[in-house]
Image: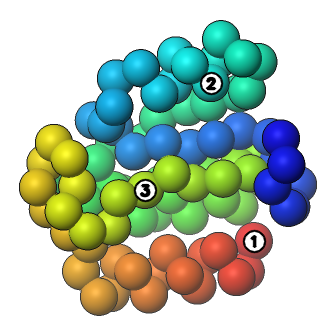
Amino acid sequence: MPFPGSGETVLIEQPGYHLFIEHLLTHGVPARGITRTAEGVDMDELERLFRSGTIKFFYTMPRLHNPLGISYTKEQKKRDRRLSREV
């Protein structure tokens, strides 16, 4: 997959577009979901997954998530940015 960094798995917020993970898997791209609720994703779980070294790309909708209609807080966005720089 032509993205920088190690890892090979695409991490995708769930719920989301229901065919996205299936499409990636069909084309041989390892993918897995991470649950997002009205409170957002479990940031500790997200950090654990990033630190595992298996995540190449995190597909997220930080603003007006579809279908939930919610946005990340400023603190959640800061933590996402920090994780992406550290890992």
Q: Is residue 63 left or right of residue 78?
A: left
SS of the residue at dot 1?
Answer: loop
Q: Amino acid at mark 3?
A: Thr
Q: Is residue 36 left or right of residue 27?
A: left
Q: Amino acid at mark 1?
A: Val
Q: Which mark is residue 60?
A: 3
Q: Residues within 10 Å of mark 2 (few under 14, many from 20)?
A: some
Q: CA distance from mark 2 to mark 3?
A: 15 Å
Residue 18 location, x and y as percent? 34, 23
SS of the residue at dot 3?
Answer: loop
Q: Are marks 2 and 3 in contact (CB under 8 Å)?
A: no
Q: Residue at x 57, y 54 (%)?
A: 58
Residue 32 location, x and y as percent? 55, 31
Q: Residues within 10 Å of mark 1 (few under 14, many from 20)?
A: some
Q: Quadrant of the C terminus?
A: bottom right
Front residue of this view, candidates 29 and 75: 29
Residue behind mark 1 = 87
Q: Are marks 1 and 2 in contact (CB under 8 Å)?
A: no
Q: Earlier in the sequence, mark 1 or mark 3?
A: 3
User: Can you say whether 74 is above or below 87 in the image?
Assistant: below
Q: Is residue 3 left or right of residue 23?
A: right
Location of residue 54 (image quadrant) = top right
Residue behind mark 2 = 24
User: Can you say whether 35 is above or below 59 in the image?
Assistant: above
Location of residue 25 (image quadrant) = top right
